Image (tube, grey):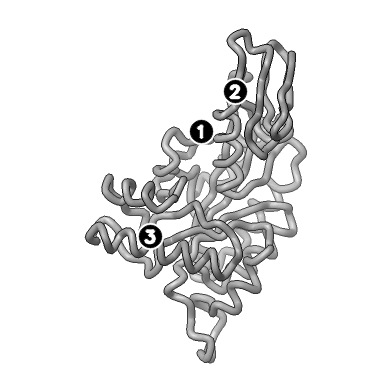
Amino acid sequence: MYMKLKDGKSKVLTLSYDDGVVQDIRLIEILNKYGIKATFNINSGQYLPEETQREKFYGRMKLSEATDLYKNSGHEVAVHAFTHPFLEKLKTDEILSEILEDRKSIEKEYGTLARGMAYPYGTYSNEVIECLKKCGICYSRTVRSTESFRLPENWLELHPTCHHNNPKLMDLAKKFVEEKGRYISDNWMFYLWGHSYEFDNNDNWEVIEKFAEYIGGRDDVWYATNIEIYDYVKAYENLQTSVDKKIIHNPSMIDVWFFHQNKTYCVKAGQTLYL
């Protein structure tokens, strides 16, 4: 048996953007236009005060703006630590507080479980990872680009494919679209990350528009948030099988696809499949 992705596909695209800035408004418009999903990592202790008069369309959002944008948007809201510190430089109780306060605020403000994260500044330590486990964080993105499409081996060190300013971005996109894994067991994940304010800083919104137009709307690609991919992989890993692989039970609430003996199967959520 080999895992296949949702609907039996072998490719998934996900994006991750940090800090909860007003440029996310324009970014989400672009992503929605091409049917692409993203995870937005929020520092819920850093919202712009509601009474602030913004002089220009730049910087962090007010809470009211953020909830209007992200809540019920189909995109994921995830943890980025309450005040965006260097977590590895903090004491254990401070690390725990930064993560838990951010989780608590996000869950209250957006009505969702906040189980994912991106490391502030991309920095972390073994102690930080242990704290994340205690706080119920199941994945956390780094800033170490792999320029590959591998699914993660360690979800708490989730390395992206590349940043959107990577000069190889469109070459990687073309490879992802036009090629496929060497073996039927291969599944590819393209993981793009960044900060949407960088498009204003560099005056290069055409980068994400071109990328999204090219890679979006494809029948053979699953467009997912970070947590959707994590939950799917875990659902596959939790399948229960007989020794001869003729009985497969899916105890999860997620439909799961797999390849077995030259055929792709789907075992529905909560159901048992007899081959």
The answer to whether the residues at label 2 and label 3 have Cβ atoms under 8 Å apart is no
Q: Is 254 left or right of 108, judged from the image as shown?
A: right
Establish if 143 lies above or below 69. above
Mark 1 to mark 2 CA distance (whole Å): 25 Å
Kindly identify which residue carries mark 3.
120
Q: Position of residue 133 (x, y in %)?
A: 38, 47
Q: Nearer the viewer, residue 17 or 264?
A: 264
Give the structural element (helix, strand or loop) at label 3. Answer: helix
Q: Is 132 left or right of 115, judged from the image as shown?
A: left
Q: Nearer the viewer, residue 263 or 33?
A: 263
Label 3 amino acid?
Pro
The answer to whether the residues at label 3 and label 1 have Cβ atoms under 8 Å apart is no
Kindly identify which residue carries mark 2.
240
Closest to the camera, between mark 3 and mark 1, is: 3
Q: In this view, which residue lies farthest toward the top?
A: 244
Q: Can residue 213 be seen in the rendering of this structure? A: yes
Labelled disc at residue 150: 1
